């Protein structure tokens, strides 16, 4: 499959995400009153774009870090497809993350000493893969053709986040985790970045879990998970006003 077509033929089918009885205590049960995250049960279907909304400190980043296997829960299971990410060993978890996941952050997290091209190619390099075609196409898709040799400091915030999108997708991951991806962009630029993510989602078909403060950003997803004090209080389908 070459993925020539937009939307009709996704190249990957995203992994489902399931949490069962997950708890994360940062300070331990003796020192903390309640866990930073407590989720008895949560299911996100493969290919879905789910949005995590909640105030600062509600547990969004903690939950994303747990799903990404960056951090481990104190109890429970986190299943990505058939893989229980928190019960495999550290080495396997790192390999799983490199192969199957892409990350987008609020402050872009690009490597300042690497060019745009090198930043985008990084996930492929870690997998020992090369795909010279992928990068040209991706840079074109995010509107950065011709900018491959620039450095992050030579780009605007919106452009840096578009580089980050290309980097998150270059290895065709099954899951994209995006932690407030528009949080440091102005409104208009944020919408442009989400529009691109929407296009890439339709084309590549990964499962997306994205946190945001913005109602408008949340409308790009399919379901909103409202989180408060580490608990999912409500799950609501996204309703588009003009649908
Ligand atoms: N590394 C950490 N050590 C101790 N407590 C933490 C750590 N990270 C987050 N917390 C606490 O966990 C809760 C959830 O934080 P976080 O997941 O960062 O929320 P959000 O991303 O929604 O702003 C907060 O009470 C925060 O203070
Ligand atoms: Mg956060």
Image (spheres, rainbow, N blue to C red):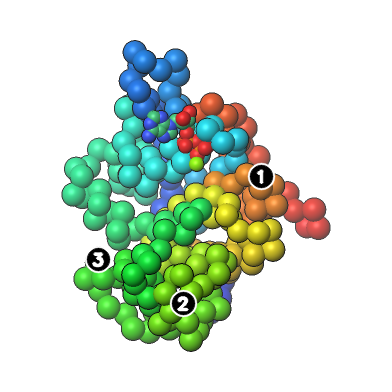
Please tell me whether residue 85 is drawn above or below residue 30 in the rendered image. below
Image quadrant where one finds the C terminus: bottom right
Q: Where residue 234 sits in the image (x, y, percent)?
A: 62, 32
When asked about the image quadrant of residue 170, the answer is bottom left
The residue wearing badge 3 is: 126
Give the residue displayed 75% in from the left and 53% down from the top: 240
Q: Is residue 72 visible?
A: yes
Q: Is residue 204 visible?
A: no
Disc 1 or 2, which lies upstream in sequence? 2
Q: Where residue 232 sits in the image (x, y, percent)?
A: 55, 31
Indicate which label's residue lies in the foreground, 1 or 2.
2
Q: Do the residues labelled 1 and 2 touch (CB within 8 Å)?
A: no
Q: Which mark is residue 110?
A: none
Q: Nearer the viewer, residue 94 or 6?
A: 94
Using residue 240 as the reference point, say whether residue 235 is left or right of it.
left
Q: Where residue 204 sits in the image (x, y, percent)?
A: 48, 68
Q: Residue furthest front?
A: 153
Please tell me whether residue 231 is drawn above or below residue 99 in the rendered image. above
Give the residue displayed 64% in from the left and 64% down from the top: 189
The residue wearing badge 2 is: 138
When asked about the image quadrant of residue 90, the answer is top left
Give how far apart the Cα atoms at labels 3 and 2 are: 18 Å
Q: Are marks 3 and 1 in contact (CB under 8 Å)?
A: no
Please tell me whether residue 19 is drawn above or below residue 157 in the rendered image. above
Q: Where residue 173 sits in the image (x, y, percent)?
A: 38, 62
Q: Residues within 10 Å of mark 3 (few under 14, many from 20)?
A: few
């Amino acid at each position: 499959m070459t993925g020539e077509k937009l939307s009709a033929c996704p190249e990957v089918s995203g992994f489902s995400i399931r949490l069962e009885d997950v708890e994360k205590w940062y300070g331990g049960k003796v020192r903390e009153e309640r866990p930073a995250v407590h989720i008895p049960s949560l299911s996100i279907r493969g290919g879905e774009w789910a949005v995590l909304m909640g105030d600062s400190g509600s547990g969004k980043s903690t939950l994303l870090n747990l799903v990404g296997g960056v951090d481990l829960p104190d109890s429970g299971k986190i299943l990505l497809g058939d893989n229980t990410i928190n019960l495999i060993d550290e080495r396997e978890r790192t390999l799983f993350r490199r192969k199957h996941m892409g990350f987008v952050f609020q402050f872009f997290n690009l490597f300042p000493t690497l060019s745009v091209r090198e930043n985008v190619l990084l996930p492929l390099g870690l997998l020992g893969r090369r795909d010279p075609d992928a990068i040209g196409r991706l840079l074109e898709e995010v509107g950065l053709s011709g900018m491959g040799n620039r450095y992050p400091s030579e780009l605007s915030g919106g452009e840096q986040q578009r580089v980050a999108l290309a980097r998150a997708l270059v290895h065709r991951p099954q899951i994209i985790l995006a932690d407030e991806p528009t949080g440091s962009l102005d409104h208009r630029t944020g919408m442009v970045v989400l529009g691109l993510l929407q296009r890439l989602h339709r084309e590549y078909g990964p499962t997306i879990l994205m946190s945001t403060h913005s109602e408008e950003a949340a409308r790009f997803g399919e379901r909103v998970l409202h989180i408060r004090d580490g608990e999912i209080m409500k799950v609501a389908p996204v309703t588009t006003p003009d649908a």
